[in-house]
Image (spheres, rainbow, N blue to C red):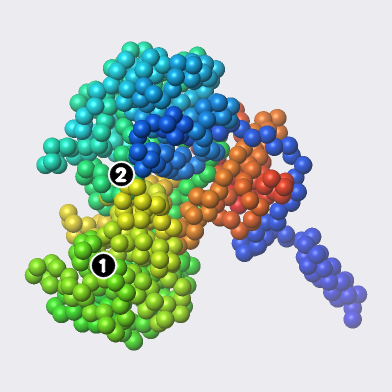
Amino acid sequence: MHWNDIKIFLCGVVITALVSCGKGDTTPTPDEPPMPTPTDDVFTPHAQCVVLDINRRSGDTESSSETGRNLYSAEYIVEVAGLPTSTTTDLSTALKKACMIILSSPIKSSTFNKQEWEKLSQWVNEGGCIISPALVEVPQGAASLFGVSGSSYNKTRTSYSWNDSYNNDKELEYADQPEEKKVSIGNAKEISGEYSIKSYAYTVTSGETMASYNTGEAAVIRKKTGRGTAYTFGVLWRDVIQRSQLNKDFSASRSYSNDFEPSADVYALFLRSTFAKTQGTSVWKFTIPAGYQTVLIPTHDCDSRTAYDQMHHMSTYEKSLKLKAHYFLTVHYYRDSPYLSAFYDDVSIAQSKQLLQDGHTVGSHSIGHFPDFSKTERFPITPVSKEDYRATHDVNTGITTGGSTWAEIALSRQIIEEDLGNKVRSFRSGHLTMNKNFPITLQDAKYAFSSCYSAGDVLSEFPYMDRIGNEWANELSSVLQIPLHFSDVINSDPMNENNWSEKPTMWLGVLNKLKGNYAPSVLLIHPNREWKMLAQKMLIESLDLNTIGLYNFEDYGDFWLDRRELRHDYCVKEKDNKILIQVNGNINASNTSYVFGIDCAAGFVPKKVIVMDSNKNSLELKIKQLSSTRYLAYL
């Protein structure tokens, strides 16, 4: 061998050895999570947003279920806001731990005694922030703290709007769309005489009126005292959160789908911004995974013979993007003439298996796809075999006979799992209908996710847990409801082969508004025409994929469930431009919920963000700048 050949050979050996020892390119592949490392940083937790459960602490005569509704709703507001939080019934504990207190329930004369009002006022004067729902009664302490002298109640106010003079205030930084500037709480077209939820208008003395009802009365008050601030909304948390989730909102929804309806989310966004305003630098659990500002989540309802025959267009396109989409399968295996044919057969099963081979996930879209599935009495929880189940729908009367909620939910899951060999974790009902038997049946059938409401219908962009029986006082189920945001079902101007290319612009408009709130964007397209694939393709090609991710439905559900269980505190090391975030449990490098928004005080730029557990195992997060004062930290 020539000497030059020997040198080349030896050089190659050295380079190979260096790379194999990790001394060459050590950039981890996407499948290699970062390894936790010990940290010697001293962690001193920042003050929290504390939910003060004022009814249970005061022995209020309000029923326990009523108390629970308000408390749940207050805690859900904080959950979506993503703030470091705890709940207590003890005022002294709240004053010690909190930089912000959100009261769970409306203020009454019995809520606090004179000494407690004095403690609260002193705490606010020294820099604390308190946010209260309606002042049902206005004792002297409340009058002084919130700057009002009284309140008046009725159920006919249908909206409130933020006053223009507050448009540039930090609290309202998310309220930058018309649908957020005017918040819907009812509908004057209701014929019952009660158009809306309970609302309380304030007689203002020393407070500022941030928002006014459609009647011109004061709806949201801000009162600055010393270095702190007190806010009160003239509504009950249960009526703007849990009521909407139960879809009992007096038709407050301004649109059903393909539009933006955040009326139940303004409270969490207000809370997040107000926390940031009072604290300078704040750290909150982000609502979108993987470093994106929103994610487009394509879902497809396969509920006809044509859908099964044509869905390969959508699946093949999505596979080319390495996009793992989600397909909800209707397993109508018998003929129900003239309503539906027996389109779920050996051919459909083979086509469905191809979806899995293409890398997608599948869930159940029921058996019968019945339009009257919301009628609880027509769909009891009756177990029945596949051989015996033959529910039929009369297209003339609109009535289904022989129906079973158990069969539509549990049996459909069993059929798909037996035929395809996959685990079915998600359910979407035909026509997005719900009856009272749904939540318990979904839970008993061991589903993880459902998508049976549009976001417009429940006034919320974000997921929440179903409630057993869809009743106020019942327990939360273990099933996460993920609302749908926009779809190919457009009643005002139906999508067809001539106008389909106009629709992606409408979807993009909704998506960009969702992006402004860091909300997910769940899309439904029935894959029964090739041009519907082209419409989705047009939408995707219009996206900035650096800020908008393409994400799987069930993966997002897992992210939200992990986020829901995640608890965090943080501390800011200003001298080192470092932020430490301590989380509950042991550090887990595969936990997708380790994503945090950071609102920074003027001049502070985070150079390093560390997430750690109580044993000081830690991971360093990536940092992305979202605006001049906001950053995103993620794995």
Q: Quadrant of residue 502?
A: bottom left
Q: Residue furthest left?
A: 396
Residue 218 percent location from the top left of the image: 28, 22
Identified by mark 2, the residue type is Arg
Mark sitting earlier along the chain (2/1) = 2
* Residue at which label 2 appears: 243
**Dot 2 crowding, Cα within 10 Å, few <14, some 14–19, many 20+:** many
Identified by mark 1, the residue type is Pro
Q: Measuring 21% from the left and 63% from the top, which residue is drawn there?
A: 377
**Dot 1 crowding, Cα within 10 Å, few <14, some 14–19, many 20+:** some
On the rendered structure, is 262 left or right of 495? Answer: right
Can residue 452 be seen?
Answer: yes
Residue 139 percent location from the top left of the image: 36, 17
Can residue 626 be seen?
Answer: no
Residue 198 percent location from the top left of the image: 25, 33
Residue 80 percent location from the top left of the image: 45, 43
Of the residues tagged 2 and 1, which is closer to the observer? 1
On the rendered structure, is 209 left or right of 620? Answer: left
Q: Measuring 30% from the left and 44% from the top, which residue is drawn there?
A: 243
> Does residue 83 lie above or below 90 as drawn?
below
* Residue at which label 1 appears: 380
Give SS at disc 2: helix
Give SS at disc 1: loop
